Amino acid sequence: MGNFLQVDLKEKTAVVTGATRGIGQTIAEAFAANGAKVACLGTNAERLQQTVDAINQNGGEAVAYICNVAKSDEVEKNAGKILARFGKVDILVNNAGITRDMLLRRLKDEDWDDVIAVNLRGTFLTTRAFCESMRKTKQGRIINISSVSGLQGNPGQANYCASKAGVIAFTRTAALELANRNITVNAVAPGFIETDMTAVLNDVVKQVAKDKTPLGRFGQTEDVANAVLFLASDKASFITGQVLPVDGGLTV
Ligand code: NAI
């Protein structure tokens, strides 16, 4: 398990989508390391179980829920199960995301639709499903994983950029709608982070990304998880509707 920021998340229940690998898996580990109970959502049953087993073997408490966040019925069904088991949800991290990169003149309808469905619709569906519990307890933290691609254009990612910019606009509006129940909603915008998602990029693209990053290196999943831990903590109680880039200075 990583070397994480220490915050007090005892008695908290956190939901993390896309927790089977990469950034989501590290966020789930970071929450568990700080005492939260973690509901891990993902579509790959085997990898999801591995994430949960690793957390439980390290003294944490995690439960697996197979759930495609783009599907309204699956989100509602799993939200019901999670609330029945844990009684409440205090923290929601909308991390599940996909890319289908292609120059827009060759971009297929389904590659546009799939990316919007997982990245943007998924964020909406889970937020709608879990915010009612937070409204009842008059506290909550929602953290949406956007991207630097939601803050600036990136050739070959019209679908992804639109979805991640949409996540930022959604974050701001949800923050306004939920503020009167003491629920904060923020976004984290990672730059180039070393995960399976970025491992598939060719060496030229990777070098360009590194060259554009003032700190001259790629981020690790722990860099994103630590920002999420802070936003999920009591220390961030006066921050809402904001976007925190974790990008080595890429968007400066
Ligand atoms: P990844 O591809 O390693 O992991 C994505 C996770 O989302 C996996 O667990 C996958 O199973 C899950 N997922 C995909 N579709 C799903 C669905 N329909 N329902 C539920 N779960 C689903 O990607 P990575 O790098 O860990 O990315 C995590 C988030 O961070 C994504 O939202 C991504 O867009 C964002 N991000 C990543 C960056 C990077 O450089 N790796 C940079 C900026 C943002």
Image (cartoon, rainbow, N blue to C red):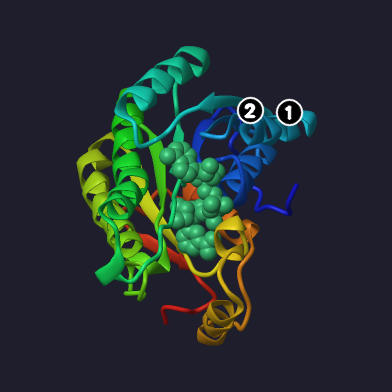
Q: Amino acid at mark 2?
A: Ala
Report the label total. Answer: 2
Farthest residue to the top: give it: 84
Some atom of ligand 1 lies within 8 Å of the CB belonging to the residue at label 1: no
As helix, strand or loop, the secondary structure at mark 2 comes to strand
Q: Nearer the viewer, residue 213 or 119?
A: 119
Q: Residue at x 40, y 64 (%)?
A: 101
Q: Taking the image as drawn, is residue 234 in sight?
A: no
The answer to whether residue 45 is above or below residue 2 is above
Distance of mark 2 from mark 1, alpha carbons? 6 Å
Looking at the rendered structure, which numbered label has been put on residue 62?
A: 2
For the residue carrying disc 1, how many other residues have a C-alpha within 10 Å: few (<14), some (14-19), or many (20+)?
some
| Residue ID at (46%, 12%) | 84
Figure check: 208 above or below 134: below
Q: Position of residue 233 (x, y in %)?
A: 51, 45
| Quadrant of the rendering where the C terminus is positioned | bottom left
Are dots 2 and 1 in contact, CB under 8 Å? yes
Three-letter amino acid code at disc 1?
Answer: Asn
In this rendering, the answer to whether 142 lies above or below 22 is above
Disc marking residue 56: 1
Image spot of residue 24 (x, y percent): 56, 46
Q: Residue at x 61, y 46 (%)?
A: 21
